[in-house]
Amino acid sequence: MNNFFEYKLEYNQISFYLGNNPTLIEREIHSYHELILYMENVGDFLTESGQRILKNNTLILIPKETYHFFKLPQEQSFNRLKISIPHSVICNTPFVSLMSEIKVIEDPGNSIMLLLKKLMSVLKRNRDEADSFFAKVLLMHLLCELNTLSEAYHKEIAKKSPFFTDITAYISNNLSDNLDIQTLSRIMHTSPSQLTHAFKREFGISLHKYITEKRLSLARHLLNEGKSPTKIYTDTGFKDYSSFYKAYMRFYGYPPSKENEI
C-alpha cells in the first residue's frame, strides 16, 4: 500500500511541490513556466507538437502558455517534484531562452540530481521563511546548471503528424477569428466528426476546450500588458464580454479585472 504525501513551499510567486498521488491525468495551459521531475511510474507526455513515453527520473521544462498532457496507466501512483516559475522571475535573464521550448531530459546527471535532492530535502523540513529562500537559491543554481547543458542533451519529442501540427498552428495564429468546428473541418479538409474525435484522441482534450483555454491564456497575457478587459474579449475570439467574463472566472477563479491584483 502506498503512503501518499505532499510538501509545498512558495517564495515570491515561485511554488515548489513534492508529492505522491494515486493517479495522474493533467491537461494544462498556464501562464507560468514549469520544471518537473518525474521519479517513478511515469506514463505518456503529450504536447501540441508531439508526444513521448517518459522514463523514471526524467526532467521536463515546460514554457508558459504551452498545452501539455500527462497520463499514467490506471492504478499507478507517481512521485514528482514540480516547480512553477512566473515569467517575471526570469525575464531579462539568460533563462528566458532556456524556457523557450519544451525540453525532456532523461537521466539529468549527478550535479543536477544533487541539486534536486537538496531541494526535496528542503521541502520536507519545517518550510519556514528561511527554507523558502533557500529553495529559491537552489532553483537559481539549478537553472544555471541546466543552461550550460548542450542542446543535444535535450531529448526530442516524437513529432505529431503534420495534420495536428497544422491545426494547432492555425488555431494559435487565428484566435480572434471564427474557430467553430465547421470552419476548422473545412480548412483541414475533413468532416466535423472526424476532426473532433481525432483531436480528442490525440490531445486528450476536446477541440472546443482547447481553443477556449488558448484564448484565455492569450487574454491573460494581454491583461498583464495593461489592456482593458472590456477591450480585449474580441481580440481573443469571444463573441461578447459576458461569455468572456464567465469563461475567465470559471478557468482562473477570479474576474479579468482582478488579474493585475493577483
Image (cartoon, helix red, strand yellow):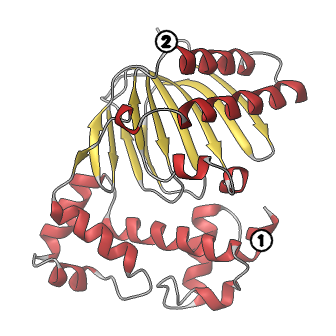
Q: Is residue 212 left or right of residue 251?
A: left
- Dividing the picture into quadrants, the one containing residue 250 is bottom right
Q: Is residue 228 above or below residue 13?
A: below
The tag earlier along the polypeptide, 1 or 2, is 2
Task: Please report the residue visible at 67 percent of the width from the left and 16 percent of the height from the top.
Answer: 118
Residue 62 horizontal/vertical position (percent): 48, 46
Type of amino acid at the residue the image marks with label 2: Asn
Is residue 13 something one can see in this rendering?
A: yes
Residue 73 horizontal/vertical position (percent): 30, 29
Mark 1 vs mark 2: give the one in front.
1
Q: Is residue 82 above or below residue 187?
A: above
Residue 188 horizontal/vertical position (percent): 16, 77
Q: In the rendering, which numbered label is found on residue 2?
A: 2
Provide the secondary structure element on which disc 1 rests: helix
Residue 178 horizontal/vertical position (percent): 35, 88
Of all residues shown, which one is farthest toward the right?
Answer: 129
Q: Is residue 204 left or right of residue 7?
A: left
136 and 40: which one is in front? 136
Task: Please report the residue visible at 62 percent of the width from the left and 48 percent of the height from the top.
Answer: 94
Q: Which residue is mark 1?
A: 258
